[in-house]
Image (cartoon, coloured by chain):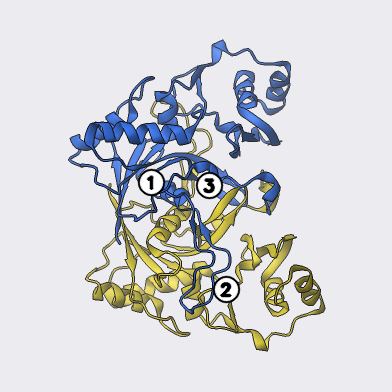
Chain colours: A yellow, B blue
């Protein structure tokens, strides 16, 4: 098994209402690449948010008293803090200009995923409302134009406790099993492997980041050659309930 | 930029004293693959531990009273607990049969990385003593036999707070900058990106896991096509000091 990762470049600026699956196929074919059965398409949540109209004009946000208070303490824009609070289910920690929240999707991340990079001045992007659903929509758009329905991962870039630097994770998944469960299987010595669940959807998202970069205007990638288990799995399966968390 | 990831299979069982770099080149050439300038070789810490003689015969371990006490509470082998304690700098949490520690390298992980999977009965593997040094040794062995010195990553599989499933991270790095720092660079709108450090060494390790699997006896992979920054960087750069940790 050899895995290859292709950047989807030349996508141009993603406007609200754009059918991302279609422009991805278009950009790929201009680059001479045709999607094959078994391909996985990874798309950044930022591109999905833009296509789904999840950009907010900050001048239209009225921050609450709580947001104003928090913003002052953190030296942040109160309108951005208002969005962070609105997108969160709970606040886990506030420090050094960062608000660690659990989003309404259940994801634990900085600032509820509200982000101002790679956006026009005066705007902030919220995460897609239902990234698993977004992945499904993109897969079906792709199938509609080229007849091949790939697995799709919507990715976002997050920090990790205890480790420096951010990596891409999967926040939306369609058509592949996000976690490979080796529990109960035998190792090479015939012993049962104890706890080994591999978060392959996160690993695929991380692999895709290597061709995407941050400033190179490449919001999508194709991962070819990875033999995944087809499944109705959702990225929600990657979220560990807070009460189960050993590391808290 | 297209990135391809090749498994290094047919390596056979890694015995103590084996020169891993040499057997990797050998296995690759049997598979028809020649290393090229710019390639990255990822090797699992388990293979490195075996080659470096970091396997411990449990019958030769004398558990301390503390290890016996902890083992009883966790329903674990006291000799394994003894090794976990010995390998740790501090214990962060104990729950459900798992001891979360900070290892002497500074890595926060389950059971100090002490592992019994894919080993003969009655043995446990400790992490390599100095995985950055191990990576360097492997790179130089490879250069010695084929004239090309690749970047090398020693990887291990860890769980993550708040997310289900494990992913591969880099615990040893040689010849590439483990973290790409985009701070101060401009986004596509000409705005300065605020906090964006990408842990590319961890992403490369995760990408490599996709071809390695857990039970397929493939302890190494070649990542080709990723344009990395050559650097004297070490995997230690990926470890966030506990006092800086926002998520704690």
The CA distance from mark 1 to mark 2 is 31 Å
- Image coordinates of residue A150 in percent, x first then y, are 34, 65
- Image coordinates of residue B86 in percent, x first then y, are 63, 23
User: Residue at horizontal 63%, vertical 30%?
Assistant: B88
Which chain does the numbered disc 3 sit on? B
- Image coordinates of residue B156 in percent, x first then y, are 48, 38
Q: Which residue is mark 3?
A: B165
Instruction: Classify mark 3: residues with Cα within 10 Å, few (<14), some (14-19) or many (20+).
Output: many
Q: Which residue is mark 1?
A: B208
User: Residue at horizontal 74%, vertical 68%?
Assistant: A74
Q: Which residue is mark 2?
A: A129
Q: Are marks 3 and 2 in contact (CB under 8 Å)?
A: no
Instruction: Classify mark 2: residues with Cα within 10 Å, few (<14), some (14-19) or many (20+).
Output: some
User: Residue at horizontal 54%, vertical 62%?
Assistant: B196
Q: Is there any visible trace of residue B137 in the rendered image?
A: yes
Specify the quadrant that holds the N terminus of chain B. Answer: bottom left
Would you place residue B121 above or below residue B164 in this image?
above
Q: Secondary structure at mark 2?
A: loop
């Amino acid at each position: 098994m050899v895995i290859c990762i292709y950047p989807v470049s030349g996508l141009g600026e993603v406007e609200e209402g754009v059918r991302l699956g279609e422009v991805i196929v278009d950009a790929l074919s201009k680059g001479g690449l045709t999607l094959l059965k078994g391909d996985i398409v990874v798309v950044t949540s930022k591109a999905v948010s833009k296509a789904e109209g999840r950009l907010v004009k900050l001048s239209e946000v009225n921050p609450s008293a709580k947001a104003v208070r928090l913003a002052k303490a953190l030296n942040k824009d109160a309108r951005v803090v208002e969005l962070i609070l609105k997108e969160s289910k709970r606040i886990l920690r506030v420090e050094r200009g960062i608000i660690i929240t659990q989003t309404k999707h259940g994801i634990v991340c900085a600032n509820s995923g509200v982000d101002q990079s790679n956006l026009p001045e005066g705007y902030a992007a919220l995460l897609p409302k239902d990234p698993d659903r977004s992945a499904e929509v993109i897969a079906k758009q792709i199938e509609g134009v080229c007849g091949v329905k790939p697995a799709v991962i919507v990715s976002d870039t997050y920090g990790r406790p205890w480790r420096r630097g951010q990596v891409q994770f999967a926040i939306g998944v369609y058509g592949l099993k996000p976690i490979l469960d080796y529990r109960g299987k035998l190792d090479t010595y015939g012993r049962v492997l104890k706890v080994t669940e591999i978060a392959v959807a996160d690993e695929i998202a991380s692999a895709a980041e290597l061709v995407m970069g941050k400033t190179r205007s490449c919001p999508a990638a194709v991962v070819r050659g990875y033999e995944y288990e087809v499944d109705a799995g959702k990225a929600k399966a990657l979220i560990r309930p807070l009460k189960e968390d050993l590391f808290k």
